[in-house]
Amino acid sequence: EFVYSQLLIDCLLRLKYIEADKQELICLCKQKYENDIAELHNLHEFEKKYSANRTLWWYTRESFFYKTLNEALRMQDIHLIFLFREFIFNIYNQLKENQAKKTLRVYRSQRVSSNELEPLKQCHGQLISVNSFFSTSTNKQKALSFLNLSDATSNFESVLFEIDADPLVTITKPFADISPHSAYRGEEEILFMLGSIFRLKSIERSSDSHVWIIGMTLCSDNEHELKHVLMDIKQKLGSGETDLRTLGRLLSEM
């Protein structure tokens, strides 16, 4: 699953996009939000004014684009991800163009269920592949402040991801400060590319709070133990532009 999720991203980013795909995506979103006047207005604006260099602006805006794309990634809705592939590619390009120039320590807080946290405690030294765009902040206090806004329940734990990211180790999965391109300036947001790979270095409860601190480092494609399997399948898929036949073959093997 780890390998094929990486290959799926690679395949989709190299698959030619046609205008009919964009129109189908817009049509699906209009159906989804047919009773939401605000989102229908956003869709009309998107249809008329969207441009590739504004993709991050649309992604950071609280609208149908962000919600539908993240839902597709979370649910692994292959058809929707297929329709979004051009926009995923444009986000990739914007991240690559604005790739961080130095090593950063960034933070992300969230509430996770006890059932999700327990396996992580057993994963010291192992790899985690993120099947979505991964939003973080350079401001630790700002990241922690989101926990204060969360509903505290007995079944959920507060978690702070503490990530060290070196731009020299990653080529295919860029990360960047997207504040200048965001719909909300001044957010100090560092966004990691879909499919970024992290190594879990530590997990412990902080001494002065009930927050679990999960330490991770960004990994390169060549660092993980499955790199030889990944490279072998990549060679079979070939380089350059892919087609629906290649995508179908990959999906049949997943």
Image: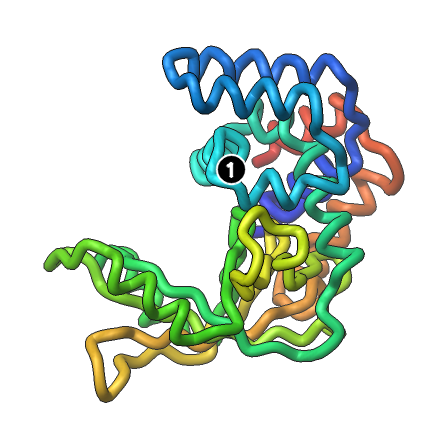
Residue 175: quarter of image: bottom right
Q: Is residue 227 left or right of residue 132?
A: right
Relative to residue 10, is residue 39 drawn left or right? left
Q: Position of residue 237 (x, y in %)?
A: 79, 38
Q: Is residue 167 left or right of residue 235?
A: left
Q: Residue at x 64, y 45 (%)?
A: 56
Residue drawn 57% across and 23% down? Answer: 79
Residue farthest toward the bottom in the current orientation of the protein? 207
| Direction from residue 118 to residue 139 in the image, left or right | right
| Quarter of the picture holding the C terminus | top right
Q: Position of residue 81 (x, y in %)?
A: 59, 31
Task: Please determine whether, in this image, residue 157 is positioned above or below residue 66.
Answer: below
Residue at the left extreme of this rendering: 154
Going 42% across and 12% down the picture, which residue do you hit? 34
Quarter-of-image position of residue 178:
bottom right
Q: Nearer the viewer, residue 1 or 164?
A: 164
| Residue type highlighted by circle 1 | Tyr
Write down the residue under mark 1.
Answer: 66
Number of numbered callouts drawn: 1
Label 1: which secondary element? helix
- Badge 1 density bin: few <14, some 14–19, many ≥20, Cα 10 Å: some
Residue 187 sits above or below residue 107 on the image: above
Q: Is residue 250 above or below residue 216?
A: above
Instruction: Find residue 204 and report its horizontal and vertical position in percent.
Output: 31, 80
Find residue 66 and report its horizontal and vertical position in percent.
Answer: 51, 37
Question: In the figure, 55 relative to 226: above or below?
Answer: above
Colouring mode (rainbow / by chain / secondary structure / one colour): rainbow
Of residue 6 and residue 135, the one placed in the foreground of this image is 135
